[in-house]
Image (cartoon, rainbow, N blue to C red):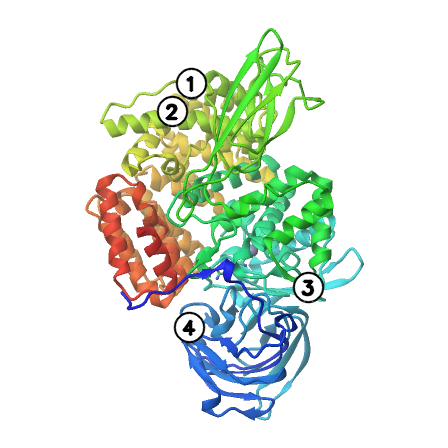
Amino acid sequence: MKESQPSAILLKDYKVPPFLIDKTELTFDLDETNTVVTSHLHMRRNPACGKSTQPLVLDGGEDIKLIGVAMDGYTLPSEEYRLVDDKLIITATADEFVLTCETLIDPQNNTRLEGLYRSSSMFCTQCEAEGFRHITYYLDRPDVMSVFTTTIIADETRYPVMLSNGNETERGKTDEGKTFVVWHDPFPKPAYLFALVAGDLAVKNDVFTTQSKRDIKLQIFTERHNIDKVNYAMEALKRSMRWDEETYGREYDLDIFMIVAVDDFNMGAMENKGLNIFNSSCLLASPETTTDDAFLRVESVVAHEYFHNWSGNRVTCRDWFQLSLKEGFTVFRDQSFSSDMHSETVKRVEDVSFLKTAQFAEDAGPMAHPVRPSSYIEISNFYTLTVYEKGAEIVRMIHTLLGEEAFRKGSDLYFERHDGQAVTCDDFVAAMQDASGVDLTLFKRWYSQAGTPVVTVTDEYDEQTKTYRLTVKQHTPATPAQPTKLSLHIPIRVGLISEQGDALTADFHNERSDDFVLHLKDNEQTFEFTSVHSKPIPSLLRSFSAPVKLHYEYTTEQLLLLLSCDSDGFNRWSAAQQLAVNELSQLIQQAENGDAFSIDSNLVAGFKALLEDETLDPAMVALILKLPSQAYLSELAEVIDPQAIKGARHFLKVTIANALAAQFADVYKKHVVMGKYQANAQDIAHRSLKNTALSYWAESADQRAQTAVAEQFKQADNMTDQFAALSIAVKTNHKSAQNMLTAFYEQWKAEPLVVNKWLMLSASQESDDALGAVKALMEHPSFDLKNPNKVRSVLGGFGQNTSGFHHKDGSGYQFLADQIIVLNKRNPQLASRLCTPLTRWKKLKPELSVQMKQQLERILAEDLSKDVYEVVSKSLA
Ligand code: ARG
Ligand code: ZN
């Protein structure tokens, strides 16, 4: 443990920057271990600070070496500046001046993957949130926006491609015979959007003609062996550009848009102005090597980063507390895009399912924070599901409250009012409110209050007066630093359905309809519907209109009715989930009590009807058949018993499999997709249902299923089918599972992204010595501790390995802690993310909980990075 611990930064301490940087001129003399960066910063005191004599304080990092600093050409002697805690402090400055700084950096040994670093044989950057200070001294904060000109100098034979933001304006030779390239970006931007890439890269070119008939040059760069895998991303990019014009009226602004794929990347991708940099796992795709899910992910990440050009770059964040301003809005935009490209219901089910599993868990744990946090120690820790996914739900609720048309007016006003500015979440809400006239004052509490509201609904029907009343209560449980909670403005979309399953109309607020949006604002409210001709079954929270936990005492019959009759596709799925959760809760209870398992047959009957109904959308059937995940059941549990949950799920799956083996076999055969592989909604739906059916069929006693798994593995012409067969073999202990894993590795060892899938699946394989197997994987030639994707594959897979990770002797937790300690200094961002499973320690059953806690304490005793310190100390608090 360190002597002094890092301190928190507070939203309430925000002050405008004392200096501005109108122009930033950078020169990079690239070298693997000794890159020299020269900056000329055209600075002036910020007029908003009045007459001030504050010193100039520039951000830096412990990994950059200051060679020299000059002001208006005058080299400062060492007594005229100070270096304190990575900051460069200059006391005497004019009101306007040019500051020149020379720094020396070592990209080759930059294992943090922040700032300028090497990945494979290329140079690349990652500057969000505070990476730029690892390149040169700067005012590294998003409200300092500057016009950048960047000169890159390198040996052209090794780095023929040299890229930065904006347009290439000049190219030539230096006196030493190296090549230089100059890039100029006319749009002022914060340093976090700066990017540089250099390497021997292949390129795919295309053109997009905008709505105003400007031709935009599109380029995707990869290492040479990957260039055949960018066609899908290129098409997705063009669809995104068109969609943003049609849906938000947003046209691209520069004449060129570039994307580069890199193998070593901490996150998914980055929206640098005109030069997006992607984790190759979010860009490369081919039918042979990429699953359907991964294709859809590529499409949505390409769209997400492209959409940031307006929601993030043209209008950016004032400070990092406002991160959701760009991330929540942009996730909402990419979700809407994917929904328009494929199936609205399927997309919504997938997004909500993820939110309810992972974001709800975060919001109920020690790292719970508001969508606009009010304090942080390390901002990298706040690129969270809360900021991204719950942030998107907030924007979606605004969309619901305003309606399509007014929402568009609001976004137009937002972009117009704040173009070129760094603003706050309040500014976003103000634009929405001003354009629509809808009062969002109370609604804004969603930004500042953490925790998932619990909404409890009861109802009564008066036969005599034909009146139906819904009484709705809300309550948000306490979260760290927020012991008491206020009531929120919650839009609840409700439909009424008759006992025969038909839509039931009612009068509500001078409107006759069968579908309403209720505005819950108080802790308790009663909503009255009149002229309701028979007793309704309420379809509550349609399309998941708010990120809340909903409680209503549905009977099994009512859930079955909703499952088969609700006109809201999302709620049909939701009813099925509730049925499965009810069944599983009983089984988990039985497992914990050591009782024999016994199940109700309702679910089996419901699934049977589903499998036999050929009129249904196969994608929906597949979604409904998927049992609630181990992670979701853990989130719902009061106390988590991983083995009990696993046992219950397995029992239910096998029971359904045996009861409906014939139906599964039949569905499996019916949904084989003929013809060439395509990643379109229709084919994806058939493959999804087919492989879900196989996953059940393979759990049954029917031996033919075993043959089908082996055949599919061997004959598949696409990764979706091949990997589905392999996963099923591993999960069902197929007699050839081991041989299949070996064959798969041999077949794909030259494709790192496929190898990552193999690593993950192998690490998740349950066995008596799961830990030994995982340790062996980390010694495997394909493993690389420097590559975040590989670390996440192995440790992520291991996290799903119940017998290994949750071993009662605590060895699984100890192993994870060991890895966190190793990575703590090498790559703090990655190390901090790996802590997530341990942050749930309080919810685990006591024997496991103490073991997890011990490991957190052991980590805390180390000399920690800010990243890991924040997560571990908050988890133990
Ligand atoms: N802005 C990027 C995106 O959402 C993510 C950057 C994350 N960077 C980080 N250091 N956590 O697309
Ligand atoms: Zn983003």
Q: As rendered, which of 561 and 20 lies closer to the eye?
A: 20
Q: Residue pushed farthest left?
A: 809
- Between tags 2 and 1, which lies in front? 2
Point out residue 754 in the picture as x, y percentages from the top left corner.
44, 54
Query: Callout 2, which amino acid?
Result: Glu
- Whole-number angstrom distance, CA of label 1 to CA of label 4: 57 Å
Q: Residue tagged by mark 1?
A: 602
Q: As rendered, which of 732 and 324 lies closer to the eye?
A: 324
Helix, strand or loop at mark 3: loop
Q: Residue tagged by mark 2?
A: 583
Q: Residue tagged by mark 4?
A: 110
- Disc 1 + disc 3, Cβ < 8 Å: no
Point out residue 177 in the picture as x, y percentages from the top left corner.
58, 90
Callout 1 crowding tier (Cα within 10 Å): few <14, some 14–19, many ≥20: some
Callout 3 crowding tier (Cα within 10 Å): few <14, some 14–19, many ≥20: some
Q: Residue tagged by mark 3?
A: 420
- Disc 3 + disc 2, Cβ < 8 Å: no
Callout 2 crowding tier (Cα within 10 Å): few <14, some 14–19, many ≥20: many
Query: Callout 4, which amino acid?
Result: Asn
- Disc 2 + disc 1, Cβ < 8 Å: yes
- Whole-number angstrom distance, CA of label 4 to CA of label 2: 51 Å
In the rendered view, would you say 48 is above or below 511?
Answer: below
Residue 858 falls left or right of residue 867: left
- Whole-number angstrom distance, CA of label 4 to CA of label 3: 32 Å
Query: Callout 3, which amino acid?
Result: Gly
- Whole-number angstrom distance, CA of label 2 to CA of label 1: 9 Å
Sequence-wise, which precedes: disc 3 or disc 2?
3
Sequence-wise, which precedes: disc 2 or disc 1?
2
- Between tags 1 and 4, which lies in front? 4
